[in-house]
Image (cartoon, helix red, strand yellow):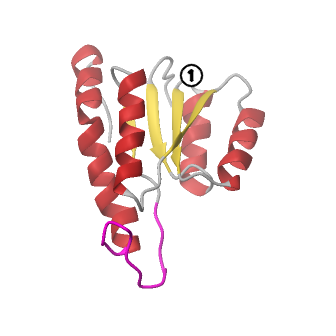
Amino acid sequence: LPRVDGKVFAITGTTSGTGFVAAWVAAELGGEVLLLNRPSQRVTDSMEKLKGIVPDGKFSNIACDLQDFESVRKAAAEIKSQYSKIYCLANNAGIMATPDRATKDGYDTQMQTNHLSHFLLTAELFPLLEAEAEQNGDARI
């Protein structure tokens, strides 16, 4: 994979699996990684692991509970207040085989976590992706 020095990656669901590896590889190749997860001990533990694997990596935790639209909006606002562009938005987080419950926003937890909140996050951050593409030729979702 090519170097990604100076590029900003926003990744949901980075406490394990594909999201964790994506954060690791992006940082190892010089990217700055925004870790979007709901607050938990798993976030703290995974951050420690990432810093151990990539000691010089640039990682930032951003609270983002995909089962709460207001939390998604706050996460997007925090990113927009600190960055004028992002190179990659990886809508990675997901849940499955959960009990049939509604979020406080009134949607099925799995539907909101896996789809609706990612659409909202993408819509909120799209101008930053466009800014990256205009300046450097491309951006990724």
Specify whether 79 is left or right of 15: left
Q: Residue at x 30, y 36 (%)?
A: 125
From the viewer's perspective, is 49 left or right of 107? right
Look at the magenta stretch and give its main secondary structure: loop
Residue wearing tag 1: 30
Badge 1: few (under 14), some or many (20 or more) residues near its Cα, within 10 Å?
some
Residue type pointed to by label 1: Gly
Q: Nearer the viewer, residue 7 or 100?
A: 100
As drawn, which residue projects farthest toward the right? 52
Q: Is residue 141 magenta?
A: no
Magenta run includes residue 100? yes
Q: Position of residue 72 (x, y in %)?
A: 38, 48
- The span picked out in magenta is 94-108
Q: Position of residue 132 (x, y in %)?
A: 29, 22
x, y percentage for residue 141? 32, 42
Which one is in front, 107 or 92?
Answer: 107
* Residue 87 appears in the figure: no
Would you say 86 lies left or right of 20 here?
left
Label 1 SS = loop
Q: Nearer the viewer, residue 105 or 89?
A: 105
* Snapshot quadrant of residue 56: top right
